[in-house]
Image (cartoon, rainbow, N blue to C red):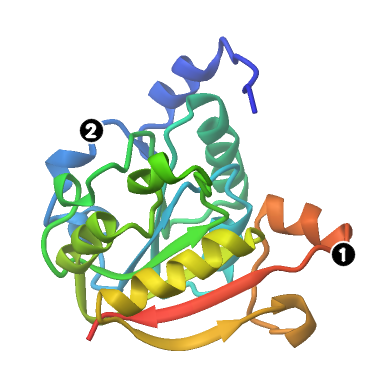
Amino acid sequence: MRQRNKPWADDFLENNSHIVIPDSSINKSKWKSVFNNENPIHVEIGTGKGQFLVGMAKQFPNVNFIGIELAKSIIVTAAQKVKAAELDNILLINENASDLREIFADDEISTIYLNFSDPWPKNRHEKRRLTFHTFLEQYRHVMKDSSELVMKTDNRGLFEYSLVSFSKFGMRLEEVNLDLHQAEDPTNVMTEYEQKFSEKGQVIYRCKTRFN
């Protein structure tokens, strides 16, 4: 979907550099110092407009959350939500998350969230899927031992592909939920997409897996 240009985005990001970090690589291995505490760090790749991240940060105040979003016109909306909520356990990164090893040191992350990632359904685009083995390899490097990766999607094809990919990579499946909202998990925080799909009665899939 084409995003509407927001001429004020650059000024907003510059004036809120305490929320949207302008150069993430300089903080590699130092993110706990940036948050000024020793709390675990959870990362959402493709944070969108920030609904999930803000909800999680409210629910888990003793966890530090980092949201990565490439689209400037979208991340400013997330930043506005973080600012309005006055949360000090969220930071945002407006960059391409093609290789997390450029942003985080080994063992620096406790949990990664992949929420409604682009399914890239064509076979020739397989390498772009965020659950392709090259992405799993970089996640393994930046995550602590036995760290959890949580994936939610409405795309059954991507979900099935990801389960196979996790298995081939030697990861341990802890949850495979074929209808998340039917399970009525009280801890589940919905993304904007998830809320829209849920209102239409669409099935949401969730998987929780760990690196051995």
Vertical position of residue 43 compared to residue 169: above or below:
above
Vertical position of residue 74 compared to residue 35: above or below:
above
Report the mark closest to the observer, 1 or 2. Answer: 1
Using the image as rendered, state which of residue 106 and residue 57 is in the foreground. Answer: 106
Amino acid bearing label 1: Gly
Using the image as rendered, state which of residue 70 and residue 154 is in the foreground. Answer: 154
- Dividing the picture into quadrants, the one containing residue 54 is bottom right
Q: Is residue 46 left or right of residue 78?
A: left
- Dividing the picture into quadrants, the one containing residue 140 is bottom left
Q: Is residue 170 left or right of residue 46?
A: left
Q: Is residue 148 visible?
A: no
Vertical position of residue 182 compared to residue 20: above or below:
below
- Secondary structure at numbered mark 1: loop
Q: Position of residue 178 (x, y in %)?
A: 66, 79
Give the residue displayed 39% in from the left and 80% down from the top.
209
Q: Position of residue 167 (x, y in %)?
A: 34, 79
Question: What residue is pinned by disc 1?
Answer: 201
Total count of labels: 2
Question: What residue is pinned by disc 2?
Answer: 23
